[in-house]
């Protein structure tokens, strides 16, 4: 059979990679995050209502915030805590937390915790729920405080608590974040019920919160900043992960992979995954050439994976405004000018600015000005815009008028 006729699905299946380059997928080894995890978890176990029981993870996209939230949530479940999870990109988090407590019937739940430990409603065994006849007709979120308080009062196991896990906190409009903070503060700090919360936020979201005088509770959350991973910890993670999968890596390859990853947690997983696949014919004995190829292949994937989904969710007008900001290489841009360039009326400028700040593409840069969050965002964004521009075929463009039908 000719090569072109071969069924490419019939070949040998690639061996499973020990690396996990997927957002929210927990790797086997967490590089450089043990100390931060220990600090955050220790804070959650402090006396109810203290600032440490409300940690917030701060870091750019791709720094592993979602992975860390998932690890904290799973460990808390195993310890018998009730864990409720929400993302700021999916609507009002108070409404989502309330939905998980009350359930589809909107009944007033009676919770029963078994010996396995509590889990998020609907995610598996561990929590039993029986509805009572009291079935309010209000929507989710409206009576969240009472539902949260009732759930907290039913935590019978010593040291067990209700843990609210909020990802993408920067994407939540400030009024909703203020309301969520006020409810949690009332239940935990005033009523002293066993409730705590951990959140993850982009740095630009933290700036917005800190500048909001009405967000007292959110401003006082204990901040934990995620930084780039140190070279030694990167190398240890590469070596342990590869060894755990049954492979080996040379010192030269280790140095090449470390330099190419630049301390970026997600890049580590991308490079590791690529090295693993490239070295399969050699039995996963990874050499320097594998590492160099992996770095070259992973670089464009990194920024597409980090920024691509957020960019694709934007409207055409959003993209026009951001493109105008990206085209200014000399410094911050007056937002009103970017809005004018996109043909947006001045009355909507504030709404667009608030929404685009929550995307993490831009950050405040002085009164009335904004700037992109990094130079790499600028080049990625302009490349994306150029690649989306329609191309006119050369031969067609050269035809005389009326000859292109």
Image (cartoon, helix red, strand yellow):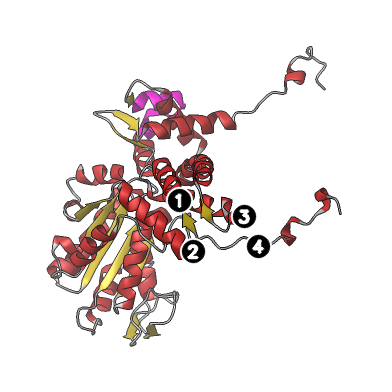
**Image depth: mark 4 or mark 2 in front:** 2
Image: magenta residue range = 334-349
Residue at 24 percent across and 42 percent down: it is: 207
Q: Which of marks 4 and 3 is nearer the N terminus?
A: 4
SS for callout 4? loop
List the residue tagged with mark 1.
250
The label number, if any, that marks residue 281 in the structure image = 3
Q: Earlier in the sequence, mark 1 or mark 4?
A: 4
Q: Which of marks 1 and 3 is nearer the N terminus?
A: 1
Residue 239: % across, % down: 41, 56
Q: Earlier in the sequence, mark 3 or mark 2?
A: 2
List the residue tagged with mark 2.
245
Q: Distance between the residues labelled 3 and 2?
A: 15 Å
- Quadrant occupied by the C terminus: top right
SS for callout 2? loop
**Image depth: mark 2 or mark 1 in front:** 1
**Image depth: mark 1 or mark 4 in front:** 1
The reply to whether dot 3 and dot 2 touch (C-beta < 8 Å) is: no
Residue 77: % across, % down: 33, 75
């Amino acid at each position: 059979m000719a090569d072109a006729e071969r069924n490419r699905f019939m070949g040998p299946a690639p061996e499973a990679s020990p690396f996990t380059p997927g957002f929210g997928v927990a790797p086997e080894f967490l590089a450089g995050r043990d100390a931060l995890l220990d600090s955050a978890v220790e804070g959650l176990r402090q006396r109810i209502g203290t600032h440490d029981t409300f940690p917030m993870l701060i870091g750019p996209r791709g720094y592993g915030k979602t992975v860390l939230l998932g690890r904290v949530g799973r460990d808390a479940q195993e310890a018998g805590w009730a864990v409720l999870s929400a993302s700021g990109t999916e609507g009002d988090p108070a409404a989502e937390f309330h939905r998980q407590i009350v359930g589809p019937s909107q009944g007033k739940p009676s919770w029963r915790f078994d010996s396995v430990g509590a889990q998020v409603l609907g995610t598996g065994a561990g929590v039993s729920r029986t509805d009572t006849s009291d079935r309010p007709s209000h929507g989710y979120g409206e009576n969240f405080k009472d539902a949260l308080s009732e759930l907290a009062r039913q935590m019978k196991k010593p040291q067990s608590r209700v843990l609210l896990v909020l990802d993408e906190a920067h994407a939540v409009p400030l009024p909703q974040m203020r309301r969520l903070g006020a409810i949690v503060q009332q239940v935990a700090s005033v009523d002293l019920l066993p409730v705590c919360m951990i959140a993850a936020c982009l740095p630009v979201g933290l700036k917005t919160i800190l500048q909001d005088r009405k967000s007292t509770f959110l401003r006082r959350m204990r901040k934990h900043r995620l930084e780039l991973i140190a070279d030694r910890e990167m190398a240890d993670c590469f070596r342990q992960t590869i060894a755990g999968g049954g492979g080996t890596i040379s010192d030269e390859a280790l140095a090449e992979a470390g330099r190419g990853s630049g301390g970026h947690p997600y890049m580590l997983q991308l490079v590791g995954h690529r090295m693993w696949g490239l070295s399969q014919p050699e039995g996963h004995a990874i050499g320097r050439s594998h590492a160099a190829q992996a770095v070259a292949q992973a670089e464009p994937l990194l920024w597409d994976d980090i920024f691509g989904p957020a960019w694709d969710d934007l409207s055409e007008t959003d993209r026009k405004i951001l493109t105008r900001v990206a085209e200014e290489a000399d410094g911050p841009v007056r937002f009103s000018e970017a809005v004018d360039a996109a043909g947006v009326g001045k009355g909507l400028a504030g709404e667009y600015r608030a929404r685009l700040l929550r995307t993490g593409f831009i950050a405040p840069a002085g009164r009335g000005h904004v700037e992109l969050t990094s130079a790499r965002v600028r080049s990625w964004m302009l490349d994306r815009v150029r690649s989306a521009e329609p191309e006119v075929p050369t031969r067609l463009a050269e035809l005389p008028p009326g000859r292109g039908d």
